[in-house]
Image (cartoon, rainbow, N blue to C red):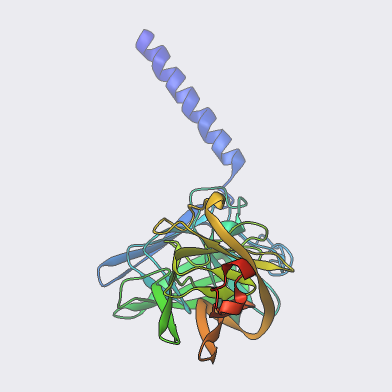
Amino acid sequence: MVIAVRISLMLLCALLWGSEAAAQGPVPSPRDSTVLVLEGKRIAVEYGRPSRQGRRIIGEFVPYNKIWRTGANLSTTFETEADLLLGDIEIPRGIYSLYTLPSPAQWKLIINKQSGQWGTTYNSDLDFARTTLQVKTIPETVEQLTIDLARTGRDAGTLTIAWENTSLSVPLRILDDPFVASPRDSVRIALNGSMLSIQYGRPFRRGRAIMGKVVPYNEVWRTGANEATSFVTEADLMVGETIVPRGSYSLYSLPSQRQWRLIINKETGQQGTQYDRALDLARIPLRKESLKSPAEQFTISFDRTGKNSCVLRLEWEFTSLSVPVRLLAETDLPTQGRSQK
């Protein structure tokens, strides 16, 4: 009797669950995935698949000039076991979220370093890169958002996003050399036999907004990437209107919309984010100019202006910053510091 009652209760629960599921209908945006294996390395996208349901999608349900989660519900996840060239940007192996920025003229694919969040939880400060998508109008109507990874060669493929009558695509391939996000570089110049040298990390723009975003205003910036930017001079210098004795320093900067300052700091060898203002030697105004074409990679250079002088220049995105540098002359010293003749 007890067994019969239990079986009846189980059947009742099953019937109730079945009727509730039928009432709810199909999942509106089911989770799906696409996988591509290139040279033994897995590349995958996992995303929510909303349906058109008679709506106008591009420009309305997916509005122009606003970040779109490129799916539904949880953020769209992009995972690669290989370093990739995606469009014109290099992506290191890892897990990311995909967003898009639609516009009538051009779409951008956004690779964001955050993952696992709800799709509308977007933080532009965590953008790793942005690249342009090829936009094409297709005759057939795609009812349900579809993301596809397809092979085009031994080490290459295409990522395609299609919905309604719009197809968006970007080529990808495995990088031949290991990815280096901000390679270390150096620049040197000799002024009358005395060497000046700078070593620094060179981050790339990668389609991102740099000034005011990646490099925020009114916050000290490491002026490079990774380790602190090092500055070594074998001679006493005038940098702008400031005396800088021979020695080793770190360079930082303080950006703002109107006036940048170059910070010469006496600490050396530290990570670039480890900044101690108490060790500042000087803060020197920089001349700011606009570049006609963007500098893709952050660049520091010395432009010679004479045997004893040069211009120190910093360039990234559309911003050029400069300050004159020359060997210290005796006339630059305070009266009490000059040699007696």
Q: Quadrant of the N terminus?
A: top left
Number of numbered markers: 0
Residue 1 visible within the image: no
Q: Residue at x 54, y 85 (%)?
A: 309
Q: Is residue 122 left or right of residue 171?
A: right
Q: Nearer the viewer, residue 140 or 94?
A: 94
Image coordinates of residue 232 in percent, x first then y, are 43, 70
Q: Nearer the viewer, residue 143 or 33?
A: 33
Image coordinates of residue 174 in percent, x first then y, are 34, 75
Q: Nearer the viewer, residue 161 or 75?
A: 75
Q: Residue furthest left?
A: 40
Image coordinates of residue 331 in percent, x first then y, are 61, 78
Image coordinates of residue 206 in percent, x first then y, are 52, 73
Q: Is residue 11 left or right of residue 124?
A: left
Q: Quadrant of the C terminus?
A: bottom right
Does residue 234 sit above or below 146 in this rendering?
A: below
